[in-house]
Image (cartoon, helix red, strand yellow):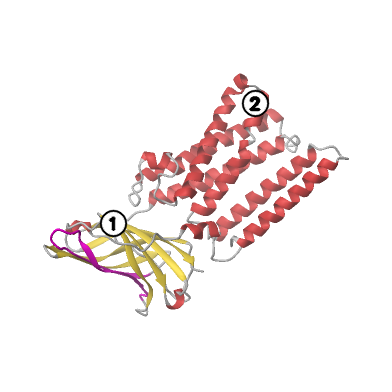
Amino acid sequence: MNHEFWYLSRAAGFTAYLLLFVSVALGISMGTRLTDRIARRNAIFDLHRFTTILALAFTLFHVYILLGDSYFNFNVWQLSVPFLTPYRTWQTAVGLASVYVLMLLVISFYVRQFIGYRAWRTLHYLTFALFAGATLHGLSAGTDTSQAWAKLIYVVTGAGTVALIMYRIQYNMPENSTLRSLRLASAIGTVVVAVVIAFGTGLFTPGRPPSAVLADAAPEEQGQPQVIRDSAAVATPAGPAATPDPYPFLASFDNDFSGTYAQTSDATGTHLTLDGVTSGDLTTKLHVELQQTRVAGANPTVTLNKAELIDPASGQVVCEGKLTALDDGYMKAACDGVGPYAGVRITVSSRVQAASDGTFSGALSGSMRRLG
């Protein structure tokens, strides 16, 4: 399965984030005259407005290009209304809220003459909440958060924004002012807290992204599959985990997925087996076996529900668990790691296309979190 739309969305997201940082930096700098030596104020304002509009354009592209992605099959409502998306719900909601604030700020450039300069300037203080929300969205929902270059972007832009805010506070305060000292102490305290949080969430820890990402990895309860259909075209899939030596820990991962399946159904029940191999962020084998027994006058009973992730090299089982959802080519599973993955909960979801010859291909994504 191709991932072009997903890659385009991720690239556009980082582009929008960097443009937003430039816009925020220019806005703060204009209040301190830092940019007066570079260009005239009206030129800097025009650049500030342009980068804000351009950030909105890339943000909208970042969101709605996902309509073409065949893995999640998002619809317009899921991408437009907070808490409707099935992908990392609250993290995505924060991102959507930031989009609406960004739209409001862009519109404000064109209605300033109607609302007045003071109201317009007050409205633009929302920029700080916007940038914080965009950062939280990127850290918690982004699949690149664990990469060194992504960490560097967040550290540089975050530290740069805090530094500019501190400078602006000092610039606008009288030289001899108790309030100035209090605000300076508050700003320094904010920096200290930010650093503590950054280290505490693993932002600077190699191979581990912030805990906000890990928290979302919490799987659903390992209950019974929601649906199992009788048609062979319903092949379902999915799973990740990994094992090459050394065994990696990834907060989130995306993989191509392919393999074979067999499904039989008769009056007594339905039996599905699936064996596939992933390639991408993680290389692993997935074995799934699900059996439902039918009894006249009663709902089908699940008599077997097994999902295993297996090291392709050694054949060792590294994660054992169950399916939690199965419906028309879509599957979710949760399992607890064993051996090198002991103490790790792995959650995966996958969507595939099944062929009549018993083969399937598609994609899967997943996440890991440490238990305890």
Amino acid at circle 2 = Ala
Q: Nearer the viewer, residue 250 or 188?
A: 188
Image location (x, y in percent) of residue 151: 58, 57
**Residue stretch rendered in magenta on the structure:** 284-312
User: Please, is residue 37 above or below residue 285 in the view?
Assistant: above
Secondary structure found at label 1: loop
Residue 286: give x, y in percent of width and height: 32, 69
Determine crowd level at label 2: few under 14, some 14-19, many 20+ residues with C-alpha closer than 10 A: few
Q: Amino acid at mark 1?
A: Gln
- Secondary structure mostly seen in magenta is strand
Residue 179: image location, x then y, percent? 82, 41
Query: Which residue is under mark 1?
Result: 226
Question: Disc 2 on helix, strand or loop?
Answer: helix
- x, y percent for residue 98: 53, 40
The residue to which callout 2 is attached is 119
**Camera-side residue: 320 or 310?**
320
